[in-house]
């Protein structure tokens, strides 16, 4: 699906007032004070989230996605330091760096990246690093899915430092929660 969607992805999401990348980048700016910090944009797609992160003054941003076409589109925007082709639902993660923050805007969802994607990222976060992720209404209202998220937070002693509800795709009245958790 995504290998065909990449051509219209940005326009379609922009037309539906996709606000989650902006909300996640605002949370990143609020809690990560080092503008030179290493950031991983998890499920970066075409770079909508990376563009918002860069707009906040961060410039050490890597991205990962499972769609080669999406990554090619992201690469053409010259946003990312490094891009990695990676399926977030796989069990093996092998990133080159440890990150000050990992951002997953619009990615953790029953039909996209499963909760284990968050668990698999933990070893790639520096001590006191952040994971910022969104859960749209569909994901949040799936009690089994939400339970897995909270089990990971509890099992790995992550601390929720902010959880905020707001717009996701405002044109279709879909909202999301933005979580900021600290390792």
Image: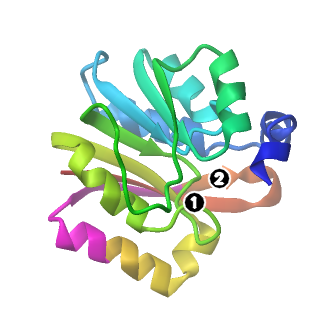
Determine which of the numbered discs, if any, sits on residue 69 in the image: none
Task: Write the residue at 39% across / 81% down.
Answer: 147
User: In the image, 148: left or right of 165?
Assistant: left
User: In the image, 79: left or right of 173?
Assistant: left
In which quadrant will I find the N terminus?
bottom right
Query: Dividing the picture into quarters, in which one does residue 36 lie?
Result: top left
The chosen color scheme is rainbow
Residue 69: % across, % down: 73, 36
- Residue wearing tag 1: 176
Residue 65: % across, % down: 57, 42
Q: Earlier in the sequence, mark 2 or mark 1?
A: 2
Seen in the picture, residue 154 relative to 30 is either above or below; the reply is: below
Q: CA distance from mark 2 to mark 1?
A: 5 Å
User: In the image, 161: left or right of 62?
Assistant: left
State which region is magenta: 151-165
Nearer-the-camera pick, 167 or 141: 141
Query: Dividing the picture into quarters, in which one does residue 39 lie?
Result: top left
- Regarding mark 2 in the picture, which secondary structure is present there? strand
Residue 175: % across, % down: 64, 60
Seen in the picture, residue 10 relative to 160 is either above or below; the reply is: above
Is residue 164 located in the magenta-colored stretch of the structure? yes
User: In the image, 183: left or right of 23?
Assistant: left
- Residue wearing tag 2: 168
- Regarding mark 1 in the picture, which secondary structure is present there? strand
């Amino acid at each position: 699906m995504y290998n065909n969607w990449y051509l219209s992805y940005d326009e379609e999401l922009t037309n539906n007032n996709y606000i989650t990348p902006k909300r996640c980048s605002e949370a990143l700016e609020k809690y990560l004070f080092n503008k030179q910090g290493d950031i991983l944009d998890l499920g970066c797609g075409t770079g909508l989230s990376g563009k918002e992160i860069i707009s906040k003054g961060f410039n050490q941003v890597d991205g990962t996605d499972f769609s080669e076409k999406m990554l090619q589109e992201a690469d053409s925007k010259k946003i990312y330091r490094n891009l990695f082709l990676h399926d977030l639902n796989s069990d093996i993660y092998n990133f080159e760096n440890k990150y000050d923050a990992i951002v997953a805007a619009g990615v953790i969802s029953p039909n996209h990246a499963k909760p284990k994607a968050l668990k698999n990222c933990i070893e790639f976060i520096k001590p006191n690093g952040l994971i910022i992720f969104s859960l749209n209404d569909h994901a949040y209202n799936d009690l089994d899915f939400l339970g897995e998220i909270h089990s990971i937070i509890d099992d790995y002693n992550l601390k929720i430092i902010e959880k905020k509800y707001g717009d996701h795709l405002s044109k279709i009245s879909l909202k999301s929660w933005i979580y900021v958790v600290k390792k």
